[in-house]
Image (cartoon, grey):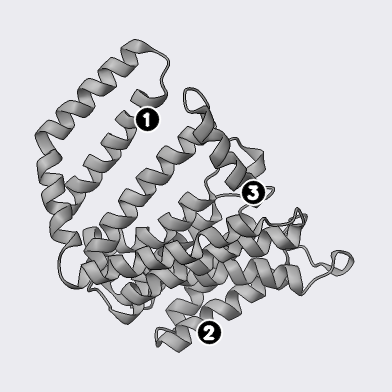
Amino acid sequence: MILIDATVFSILSTVFIIVVATSVNVVYKVVAFTLLTSLLWLHGGEFLEFSYSQIFDGPNMYMIIYWILSLTMLVPIPFLARPRASKTSIVLWRKFFHLIVLVLFVPPLVMHQGEFDGLLALAGTLMLCLLVIMEVFRVVRKPWEKLSLLLNRLICPLLDHKDQTSSIVTSHLELLFAVVFPVWLALVVKGPFARRDYVIAGLVTVGVGDSAAAIGGMCLTAAPHKLPWPRHSKKSLEGFLSFLISTNTVLVFLGSWNYASCFACIVAGLFEASMPKYDNAILPIAYSFSRLAFVRIRI
């Protein structure tokens, strides 16, 4: 089983599990359970064998132990801290999860370039599937009412105005997707996307840039003096400039800065400033393809 097959297997299994666990229609439950059982019977062994080869491959095991220890120490902090219901407090604690992403993914993507890409893609896909299942359980209360109440009690204090416009929360999914998507491009599409300059797109634009834009835009402006940008937007020119400065500074530090990366940061910054929702999922895509377009046009 190759990585693409493992991903398709994970997605289909997730869909069938959700239908079996939440559907009130008995026919849907039976059909989904039958399909899930067939899928596990036909390909479950291959998937387990592939996962085993990725997990217990020498260095990969040490990276997984590092991830587990980091998650155990960092994830409970914002939930135990009980953020106050102020905009500043919510923004800062939400960006704490961006810090967690940096702690988790900087070592495999920056310090050990390319060594853990297969493990990252598999682990990221499985984690996305798990988060989707948890989000469905949170929204669909019956027959998982106690679990739904627990998840809502943990998540609701951290929601901002974007999340509150919909019953489904996607911020955490977008954050993880932003880091995993460039790795997928590197492994599947390959070509220029396999270069480290493109693989770190999610870390640079979302892990650093989006955090800097939110915190910089909040700290550098007071409501009466805020410079909305684009016009009539809740985002500010100060936030956009914070995005550009932080992303370009990180790229210089990593030795990945050039005119193409500067252009890509500007494009990603424009997307971040103009999109009211789902910007985290779009930023690494905008960065990667605009950087590639700049290189191709110059050639």
Q: In this orientation, does residue 206 appear?
A: no
For the point 72% across and 72% down, the residue is 238
Tell me the element at label 1.
helix
Percent position (x, y) of residue 49? 11, 50
For residue 132, above or below residue 30: below
Q: CA distance from mark 3 to mark 1?
A: 24 Å
User: Horizontally, is 81 left or right of 13 in the view?
Assistant: right
Residue 185: image quadrant is bottom left
Instruction: Kindly identify which numbered label has been placed on residue 18.
Output: 1
Residue 165: image quadrant is top right
Q: Which residue is mark 2?
A: 249
Percent position (x, y) of residue 141? 53, 27
User: Horizontally, is 182 left or right of 276 in the view?
Assistant: left
Q: CA distance from mark 3 to mark 2?
A: 29 Å
Residue flagged by tag 3: what amino acid is it? Leu
Residue flagged by tag 2: what amino acid is it? Thr
Estimate how packed mark 3 is, as few (under 14), some (14 to 19) or many (20 or more) residues with alpha carbons within 10 Å.
some
Estimate how packed mark 1 is, as few (under 14), some (14 to 19) or many (20 or more) residues with alpha carbons within 10 Å.
some
Instruction: Kindly identify which numbered label has been placed on residue 159.
Output: 3
Residue 59: image quadrant is bottom left
Viewer-nearest residue: 8 or 35? 35
Residue flagged by tag 1: what amino acid is it? Ile
Quarter of the C terminus within the rendering: bottom left
Q: CA distance from mark 2 to mark 1?
A: 43 Å
